Image (tube, rainbow, N blue to C red):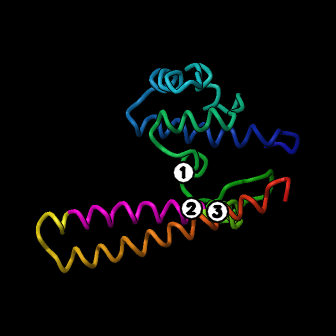
Amino acid sequence: MSDSEPVVDWLGRGLGQSIKRATKAAGSSYVKVSERTRELGVPIHRTALGKIEKGERDVTVRELVAIAAALDTSPLALLFPDALADVEIFPGVTKQGVEILGEWADDHKTRTALELFDNEEALRLQMLWLRKNELYGFDDKAEKARHMVELLEAEHQRLLDAYKNATEDRSPDA
């Protein structure tokens, strides 16, 4: 890589290779990914996907999200297919993927949103556990699950309030 090479080129090549691997892992093709992105309302032609793979074409955030959805993965999984690997975030600046992810999520609002997501998943699983125990008549286990649901719901409300407060703190009117 030359010093004059635009940042997007080396980032594009890495992202492009990640998209290529994810497409292969999904048993898909650029034709299918292209069709799916069109269905999602963000059409990306199959030849454009080939150019992205080679680092010859930029990718917008909207396109990245559409490609990830078409491949049933997350945009972050495409950006960081191996979070333990070193990533050249800027020319000559290399960091481990998890370090970069940590920096990106190192603000109160983002951390709260991630905690809220985790809480919602835990609440969903606990409610399934509660229903299962109620169905089979395991009253003691159902009562414990009910208590956990109450605790998780209270935590959910706390996180929602914290997220709303963080959003208000960043508003231009604040």
Q: Is residue 114 magenta?
A: yes
How many residues crowd around disc 2 within 10 Å: few (fewer than 14), some, or many (20 or more)? some
Residue position for label 3: 163
Q: Tell me the magenta residue range.
A: 113-131
Q: Which of label 1 and label 3 is nearer to you?
A: 3
State the CA–CA distance, disc 2 to disc 3.
10 Å
- Measured from the top left, where is residue 45 in percent x and y? 58, 19
The answer to whether the residue labelled 1 contacts the one labelled 3, judged by CB atoms less than 8 Å apart, is no
Which secondary structure dominates the residues rendered in magenta? Answer: helix
- Measured from the top left, where is residue 12 in percent x and y? 68, 38
Give the vertical position of 18 relative to 82 (above or below): above
In this view, the residue in front, 115 or 144, is 144
Residue position for label 2: 114
Going by the numbered disc 1, the residue's amino acid type is Pro
Q: Does dot 3 land on a helix, a strand or a loop? A: helix
Q: Is residue 52 magenta?
A: no
Residue position for label 1: 81
Q: Residue at x 54, y 66 (%)?
A: 115
